[in-house]
Amino acid sequence: MSSNKIVVVMGGTSSEAGISRKTGTAITKALQEKGYDAVPMELVPQTFAADIQKSGCAIVFNALHGKFGEDGLLQGTLEMLGIPYTGSGVLAAAVTMDKAASKRVFIAEGISTPRSRTYCRYEMKERGLEGEIEKDFGIPVVVKAASQGSSIGVYIVETKEALADALKAAFAYGDAVLVEQFIRGRELTVAVWGDAEIQEAFPIIEITTASGRYDYESKYTKGASTHIIPAPVGDAATKKIQALAKRTFAACGCRGVARVDMMFAEDGTPYVIEVNSVPGMTELSLVPDAARAMGIEFPELCERILALAGFKR
């Protein structure tokens, strides 16, 4: 085994594979610029265990988004093989990838989050859910596939006529759908890095978009969104929001770098929406922008993520 080789795992078969390749390519290039022996690896699930052992790497830099990379499967495989890796462990990855599971953690820990309910596929077959959801949540309402990222499978339903189609589309991704109270306000995100003992919050980012929705297109189309850093929310709210982000990071058992997405309601209440345990690291991504606001350029950010995983060269 090489004492210094870093394998950046990316791609795979998930709906977010394309974004993962952009993230992985950027990370590989940044680490190479810092003089690291970093090489990319495309994930082939059926042969990954053999591929990574054959690579002789000292550590895996996890750049996988979605299935396998954010749901604990990659982490579990590497744990069994005794290979270190960046980011959160098996349980934290699985919990944060599943929106229904992470909601249960938020509620149990008293973390401010929009009111929600999880519906299973059998309920869709047993009864019409549209009237029930409209009665309990009103319109607009948010419908989400439980286990997708990058805003894939997320629908903001603004008319009751659109609710049935949104449910059908969300169930196409899996057996569970999260229905969530719609919060009017500003979209914020806070990156946090650390481990079980200490966490540090990055500057708060406010996200504005031309479309008014921070959806897949807004995230990955150049010029479609604007990141305001630091978010102009005032000193008191900044402290409250960053503390909430750190508490959420710890409650979910995250380590390395994770991103906590929030809505800042019109009444000044911050609500945690979800946690991204493998946040995007492309040229348009939020975490690198927040790091630059702290004076940390992208190569150094990648280097520090390695250090958080215990890697030393």
Image (cartoon, rainbow, N blue to C red):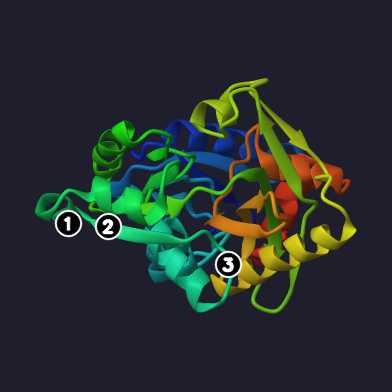
Q: Residue at x 65, y 45 (%)?
A: 185
Q: Is residue 59 above or below residue 64?
A: below
Check disc 2 and report its element: helix, strand or loop. Answer: strand
Q: Amino acid at mark 3?
A: Cys
Q: Earlier in the sequence, mark 1 or mark 3?
A: 1
Q: Whole-percent x and y of residue 145?
A: 35, 47
Residue labelled with disc 2: 119
Residue 254 image label? 3
Residue 123 image label? 1
Q: Whole-percent x and y of residue 6?
A: 59, 50
Q: Marks 1 and 3, how far apart in space?
A: 32 Å
Q: Marks 3 and 2, how far apart in space?
A: 26 Å
Q: Residue at x 69, y 45 (%)?
A: 287
Q: Whole-percent x and y of residue 213?
A: 56, 32
Q: Are marks 3 and 2 in contact (CB under 8 Å)?
A: no
Q: Is residue 86 left or right of residue 291?
A: left
Q: Amino acid at mark 1?
A: Glu
Q: Amino acid at mark 2?
A: Tyr
Q: Is residue 288 above or below residue 175?
A: above
Give the label, 1 or 3, closer to the camera: 1
Q: Count the marks.
A: 3
